[in-house]
Image (tube, rainbow, N blue to C red):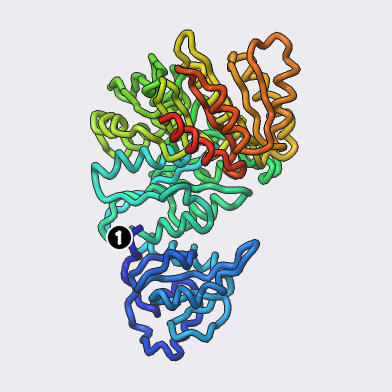
Amino acid sequence: MAGMIALTLREIAEAVGGELRLGASGGSPDTRVDGTVTTDSREVGPGDVFFAKRGEFDDGHRFAPAAARQGAALLVVEHGLDLPVPQIVVADSVLALGELATSVVARVRAAGDLKIVGVTGSNGKTTTKNLLRAVLERVGPTVAARASYNNEVGAPITMLSLEQDTRFLVAEMGASGVGEIARLVRMARPDIGIVLKVGLAHAGEFGGIEQTVLAKSEMVTDLLPTDVAVLNLDDPRVAPMAELTTAKVVTFGLGAGADVRATEVVVHARGTEFTVHVPGGESARVRFGVLGEHHVMNALATVAASVELGVPLTEVVAALETVTLAERWRMQVMGGRDGITVINDAYNASPDSMSAALKTLAQVQAPGTRTIAVLGEMSELGEFSGEEHDRIGLLAVRLGVSQLVVVGQGARRLHITTINEGSWDGESAYVETADEAYDLVVAAARPGDTVLVKSSNSAGLRHLGDRLGEWFS
């Protein structure tokens, strides 16, 4: 990730409202710093800035000496440390990180033509962010988060990699509670705010679906009349957000009423094809290499935002067609030996994304072949956990999955629900560990089978998907 724009130690201290202590460092308040900003001491290199963050299980101050040894130019700490490196002492290092990001975004915006796109939703944020990056970097210098850097730490770190000539910032904004997206929006007020979907992902943390809706709507409530709110017209929880903003509203979806819509959607093992229609009557056929019909919605959101930013539709489509993988461990196609395909989609799982993955598994199944679904727990669902695991089990039955492998105690209810469906021709097996699941699938797979691995990140099945993909490659 690129370093921060050059600021003096004095300017950084003023931005974060902290006390600059030079101590024995031999530095000056006018010393300029332009290194990478990080909270991970293992990533620190010469000239970088290390924020010592207190965590749930550890304290970043313990690693400040390592950051100093590795050449950090500045430490931002909550109490002074006996180290020969300039330090800025603040009350809360995470809040200070956000304040520095706010200052840097404002400086870059004032000096140039920076446009900011904010992306939120229960599913699809990272995919949409990656698609937007693929489109916008064709037009000008673009900064977008790596992986899923979308929380109170990851989002500002992304913002702090802006350079003076950055033309576009794509800010992925996640949350686990009301007020968190609003805080990120205050750091980098979007010119375009996208809300993809509101589902049960993290509903347990939010305290219910109504709180989730409230949190996600923070993306658009403070947009200005000159800004644009890009909203999913097909989602009954997102579409009403049009009434909460003074911004111009552009909708996307599969229905005829959407401003940006898709028709003639075809899903196959090589990806998805569809025709995209935009305001003004222009349309184009898209041969999208990302597997799964649900990713069409992410592509439509990308089209809507990009066209609003002035990117010609032909350029948008050309960029979309270069993307073959949304992100590692997200509908990642692997394998190939004996015609066995492994779809590793085990980075995250919510009821919506689990349903979408199972439907894709059924859609890409070739006649005369079998499907195997290796499913782990959907975490952070709170009171909805039991019924949602039941629903996924029933969906697997309805879709005719040939072999179900349920992994871990947290997903066991899914297995029980499935085997209680007496009319199902398939089979379900329950195992405790990923190693047991690996052995079972390796023994059970037949030529031509398609294997889906899907779970929440906490279940750790993404590495199982990698192992299966390597075995069958």
- Report how many numbered discs are placed on residues in the image: 1
Does residue 401 lie above or below 210 as drawn? above
Classify the position of the N terminus by image quarter: bottom left
Residue shown at 55%/67% (left/top)?
Answer: 53
Q: Nearer the viewer, residue 130 or 237?
A: 130
Does residue 425 lie above or below 240 as drawn? above
Asked if residue 218 can be seen in this view, the reply is yes
Does residue 276 lie above or below 13 as drawn? above
Classify the position of the C terminus by image quarter: top left
Q: Quadrant of residue 162?
A: bottom left
| Rendering coords of residue 463 (x, y %) | 52, 41
Residue shown at 43%/62% (left/top)?
Answer: 101
Q: Which residue is mark 1?
A: 163
| Rendering coords of residue 2 (x, y %) | 33, 60
Residue shown at 60%/34% (left/top)?
Answer: 350
| Rendering coords of residue 108 (x, y %) | 32, 61
Q: Is residue 152 left or right of residue 264?
A: right
Q: Nearer the viewer, residue 252 or 163?
A: 163
Q: Quadrant of residue 408?
A: top right
Q: In what element is the residue under mark 1?
A: loop
Pointer 1: residues within 10 angstroms few (<14), some, or many (20+)?
A: some
| Rendering coords of residue 351 (x, y %) | 61, 30
Asked if residue 236 can be seen in this view, the reply is no
Three-letter amino acid code at the position of disc 1: Glu
